[in-house]
């Protein structure tokens, strides 16, 4: 008994502590080796900088878009507060990937898998990330999403298998955290939460307690979305501000949302199998076969979700979803009761096949480009007026200003030209607008002023193009003092 | 659940043998022999001085730097809330451990037979509750335990003629007796229990309240639990729940709270080996150890909680037992407030008693258990007292957004405060939901969503307790039972 316990503890320490730490370190090392300029927290760093400074832009950025995950920002915040760049990014990267490997252990522990298989699965996910060599895939935020997807899916699978209250709670918590990981996994979180009460309909005993599973499964998710809306109302004055970009990104939003939920159909065979096994069982629980079917279906569902986003030209979410799906597939294979060599071969096959899924890209050092754009804009504005103020729009703007210490350029997340003119009376105001490409298309400025980049807007004058950015001057009447100063200079 | 059968009055009189022995018993033994362990002196002179010095320092700081003092106090409370939330989560997480609760199946109990069961003493302190007597006798009679091994004492106050008359008019099964508690100060339940303890004949002892309905196999399970556990396990706490949960909204909330406490939190605490504040009834003891510890503190209005701490200080352990005693939830708001006042006051009393010598407490409990003690015994009333201020601030901030409130919550404190507001409160509500779900009281889960209103009621009770602690520390505000009838 004593020897078994010691062995169990050793195994726990190995798969839950030592291996995740080693693999996270290895992943960090390889990432830095492969692409020296890789930035594991590209977007989060700029937002955290504003949050620590206590600016309104920071608070708006934290909650203002469903495409920028608040959880990733909140996760990065303590690192950003404690360390300077690039240490903060690397530390966050290490912790996030540690979490992924720990999640693999949790997902396999409940299935009763041994130490070897757990380490194999953890190594396969690390190998997947290294082989793919995709900067999006290696982001800290992606790692968090992958870890939560693994926890969520494995909890749903365990709930299917054994109907333990603990699994409902962990699945519900994971769904709630996933909802804060951005819109790309929100559909997955909702479907997972929906599965909790629905799968329980198979057995007479659990069917009678439908409302309990519904409440326990859905409440954290609904509450999270409710708090997100409340904070949008408080910080941005509009409870649905973070969702408004969907209408701009997809001409037919209803169809898009329907298409996003449609992959749930993939779950039907697994659900039918679960119900069938469960209804024949004496005690609630459909067993490991139904659990594996559920896990694989969820992985396929994630791939289908990724395809929907691609069809609607929201392709930047693709890598995260594929990464989640493949990791889930790895966990599903590792949960199967088969000899270790066969598991090893299956995992290697998944890793090898995954190469085809990801477009290889090499991280570029864009700090020089950023500095150049900022320098040019500053020079232009300073030559035009000593009272200049430039508002750099959107999350892209926060990223542009992440190393900027000057006073001339300021981030702006929620553009109200009238308010800016009122608040900065007497100053020459400029707007620096990013090109609506890729991720930047989801910026709030584009659903408020769809043609701003091409045509400007009311009271805006085109001033120049700097890299992919366009500068517009806000037309406003000069104050009496400015007029007099201008006249004096003229005379 | 037991179905009480009315007993016809009989010519048999209850056993009154014990009455003569009572005069020799000192029910205040603990207060007389170990005053430092008793709440007979609620706050010692040293504690009073410490409080006075702290208050003076606080006042001085408030005068010299009011804003900084306010920020510091808020920071302290916010950190406390955060730790409290995380602590609760950890305890709930621990409650799923197999070590959390001792459980025995029907088959395991059946396998014990035939065997000799030890004598089991059952104490039932009662005061002006004649209406519950019948139900109690029936419940005890139906306990699955050999009749000749049951040693039941009804502890009745000398001046409670109502209950006394009702008891004397009843037929008592063999092994059941009346113990008349002489009228003296303080008139508390623990004092009566101390007399009962000295007259107990059993190897094990349990206390039930007058309206309790223990599960039939509880005594056998308790014996098996003691026999299966290590020698240092001297107390086994059964789970408590309410049979009248559907009576009104108060009983629904009360049941949700009890389900979370007894089905999740106490098992979690037992699993991590923390100090266990014992529940009011259905705690089973090894009689000898209880006698060695001089029984209950007659001056403490939550003597059960105090005893739990004393057991831990003496190096003993408490385990949770998978069996339920069904009680009657207080359904009247006035009585509920009185009951809650007593509980909170008792926790404050207990905290002051054991904090007379913190160094000694750390030495006896160990640092980890000392921290558990602070979170459980000190933290409970503290959070109840500070909650109204933070709710008010949150409300003011949401509605009017005054700059003054924002200045009280600089950067990290604001972040921590937001964490407590949005996540902490949700976690506490969700724990109650989980408790209901675990207890299979699904219909109560929707009501548990409204628990924040219940917390406001608790805060009212908490403030009442705090003031009463200084004014009337020994007043025992009795809970009126029988208001909702057995459902």
Image (spheres, rainbow, N blue to C red):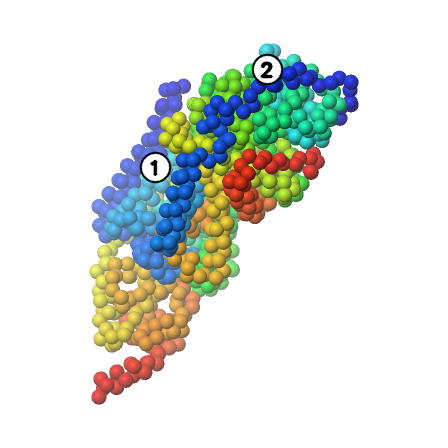
Q: Which residue is located at x 26 percent, y 83 percent?
A: A486
Q: In this view, does A42 lie above or below A153?
A: below
Of circles 2 and 1, which is in front? Answer: 2
Dot 1, how many residues are within 10 Å of its Cα: few (below 14), some (14-19), or many (20+)?
many
Q: Residue at x 72, y 29 (%)?
A: B162
For disc 1, the marked residue is A122
- Image quadrant occupied by the N terminus of chain A: top left
**Residue B201 disc label:** 2
**What is the quadrant of the C terminus of chain A in the image?**
bottom left
Answer with left or right where residue A180 lies relative to residue A134. right
Q: In the figure, residue A50 lies in which quadrant? A: bottom left
Give the chain letter at badge 1: A
**Residue A333 image-quadrant placement:** top left
The structure residue drawn at horizontal position 63% and vertical position 38%, both measured from the top left corner, is: B330
Q: Which residue lies at the image location 48% right of the left edge and 39% below the top edge?
A: B380
Q: Nearer the viewer, residue A416 or A234?
A: A234
Please name whichever residue, A327 or A22, is drawn nearer the observer in this view of the structure.
A22
Q: Is mark 2 on a helix, strand or loop?
A: loop
Q: Position of residue B40 (x, y in %)?
A: 51, 31
In the image: residue A238, left or right of residue A373 = right
Pinpoint residue A244: horizontal percent, then vertical percent.
46, 62
Q: In this view, does A8 lie above or below A21?
A: above
Q: Which disc, if any, is residue A50? A: none
Q: Which chain carries label 2?
A: B
| Residue B23 in the image, given as x and y percentages of width and height | 60, 18
Secondary structure category for the residue under label 1: helix
Residue placed farthest to the bottom in the image? A491
Q: Is A280 positioned to the left or the right of B15 in the image?
A: left
**Residue nearest the observer in this picture, B192 or A333:** B192
């Amino acid at each position: 008994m004593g020897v078994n316990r010691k062995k169990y503890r050793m195994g726990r320490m190995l798969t839950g502590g030592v291996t995740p730490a080693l693999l996270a370190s290895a992943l960090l090392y390889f990432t830095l080796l492969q692409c020296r300029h890789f930035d594991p927290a590209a977007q989060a760093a700029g937002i955290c900088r504003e949050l620590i400074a206590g600016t309104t832009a920071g608070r708006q950025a934290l909650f203002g878009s469903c495409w920028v995950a608040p959880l990733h920002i909140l996760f990065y915040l303590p690192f950003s507060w404690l360390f300077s760049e690039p240490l903060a990014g690397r530390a966050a990267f290490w912790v996030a990937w540690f979490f992924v490997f720990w999640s693999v252990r949790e997902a396999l522990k409940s299935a009763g898998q041994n130490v070897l298989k757990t380490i194999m699965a953890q190594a396969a996910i690390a190998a997947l990330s290294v082989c793919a060599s995709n900067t999006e895939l290696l982001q800290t935020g992606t790692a968090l999403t992958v870890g939560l997807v693994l926890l969520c899916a494995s909890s749903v699978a365990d709930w299917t298998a054994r109907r333990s209250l603990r699994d409902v709670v962990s699945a519900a918590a994971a769904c709630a955290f996933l909802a804060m990981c951005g819109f790309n996994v929100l559909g997955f979180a909702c479907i997972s939460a929906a599965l909790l009460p629905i799968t329980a309909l198979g057995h007479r005993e659990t069917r009678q307690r439908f409302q309990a599973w519904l409440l326990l499964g859905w409440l954290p998710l609904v509450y999270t979305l409710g708090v997100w809306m409340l904070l949008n109302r408080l910080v941005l004055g509009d409870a649905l501000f973070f969702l408004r970009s969907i209408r701009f990104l997809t001409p037919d939003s209803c169809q898009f949302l329907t298409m996003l939920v449609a992959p749930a159909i993939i779950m039907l065979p697994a659900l039918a199998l679960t119900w069938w096994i469960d209804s024949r069982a004496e005690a609630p629980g459909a067993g490991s076969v139904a659990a594996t079917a559920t896990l694989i279906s969820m992985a396929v569902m994630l791939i289908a979700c990724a395809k929907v986003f691609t069809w609607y030209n929201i392709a930047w979410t693709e890598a995260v979803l594929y990464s989640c799906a493949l990791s889930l597939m790895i966990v599903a294979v590792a949960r199967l009761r088969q000899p270790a060599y066969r598991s090893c071969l299956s995992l290697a096959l998944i890793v090898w096949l995954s190469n085809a899924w990801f477009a290889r890209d090499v991280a570029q050092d864009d700090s020089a480009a950023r500095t150049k754009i900022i320098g040019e804009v500053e020079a232009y504005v300073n030559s035009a007026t000593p009272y200049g103020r430039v508002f750099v729009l959107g999350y892209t703007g926060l990223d542009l200003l992440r190393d900027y210490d000057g006073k001339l350029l300021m981030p702006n997340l929620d553009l109200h030209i009238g308010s800016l003119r009122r608040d900065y009376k007497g100053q020459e105001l400029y707007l620096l607008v990013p090109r609506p490409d890729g991720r930047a298309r989801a910026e709030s400025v584009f659903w408020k002023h769809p043609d701003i980049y091409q045509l400007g807007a009311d009271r805006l004058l085109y001033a120049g193009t700097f890299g992919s950015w366009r500068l517009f001057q806000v037309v406003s009447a000069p104050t009496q003092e400015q007029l007099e100063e201008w006249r004096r200079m003229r005379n | 659940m037991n179905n009480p059968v009315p007993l016809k009055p009989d010519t048999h009189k209850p056993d009154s043998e014990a009455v003569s022995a009572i005069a020799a018993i000192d029910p205040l033994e603990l207060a007389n022999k170990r005053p430092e362990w008793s709440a007979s002196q609620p706050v010692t002179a040293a504690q009073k001085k410490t409080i006075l010095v702290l208050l003076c320092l606080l006042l001085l700081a408030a005068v010299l730097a009011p804003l900084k003092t306010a920020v510091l106090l808020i920071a302290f409370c916010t950190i406390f809330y955060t730790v409290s939330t995380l602590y609760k989560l950890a305890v709930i997480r621990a409650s799923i451990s197999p070590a959390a609760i001792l459980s025995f199946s029907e088959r395991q109990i059946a396998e014990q037979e035939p065997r000799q069961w030890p004598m089991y003493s059952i104490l039932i302190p009662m005061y002006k509750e004649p209406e519950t007597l019948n139900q109690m006798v029936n419940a005890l009679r139906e306990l699955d335990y050999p009749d000749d091994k049951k040693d039941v004492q009804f502890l009745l106050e000398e001046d409670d003629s109502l209950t006394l008359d009702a008891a004397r008019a009843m037929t008592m099964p063999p092994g059941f007796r009346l113990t008349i508690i002489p009228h003296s100060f303080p008139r508390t339940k623990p004092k009566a229990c101390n007399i009962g303890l000295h007259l107990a004949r059993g190897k094990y002892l349990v206390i039930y309240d007058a309206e309790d309905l223990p599960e039939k196999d509880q005594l056998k399970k308790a014996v098996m639990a003691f026999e299966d556990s290590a020698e240092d396990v001297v107390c086994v706490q059964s789970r408590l729940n309410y049979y009248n949960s559907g009576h009104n909204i108060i009983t629904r909330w009360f049941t949700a709270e009890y389900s979370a406490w007894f089905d999740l939190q106490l098992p979690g605490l037992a699993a991590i080996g923390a100090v266990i504040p014992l529940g009011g009834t259905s705690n089973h003891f090894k009689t000898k150890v209880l006698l060695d510890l001089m029984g209950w503190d007659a001056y403490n209005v939550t003597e059960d909680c105090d005893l739990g701490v004393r057991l831990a200080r003496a190096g003993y352990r408490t385990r949770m037992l998978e069996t339920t005693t069904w009680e009657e939830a207080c359904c009247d708001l006035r009585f509920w407030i009185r009951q809650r006042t007593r509980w909170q006051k008792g926790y404050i009393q207990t905290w002051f008693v054991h904090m007379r010598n913190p160094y000694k407490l750390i030495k006896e409990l160990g640092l980890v258990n000392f921290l558990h003690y602070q979170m459980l015994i000190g933290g409970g009333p503290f959070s109840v007292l500070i909650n109204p201020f933070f709710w008010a601030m949150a409300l003011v901030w949401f509605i009017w957004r005054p700059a003054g409130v924002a200045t009280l919550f600089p950067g990290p404190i604001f972040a921590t405060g937001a964490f407590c507001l949005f996540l902490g409160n949700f976690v506490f509500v969700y724990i109650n939901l989980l408790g209901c779900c675990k207890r299979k009281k699904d219909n109560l889960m929707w009501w548990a969503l409204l628990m924040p209103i219940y917390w406001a009621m608790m805060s009212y009770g908490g403030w009442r307790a705090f003031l009463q602690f200084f004014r009337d520390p020994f007043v025992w505000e009795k809970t009126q039972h029988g208001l909702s009838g057995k459902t």
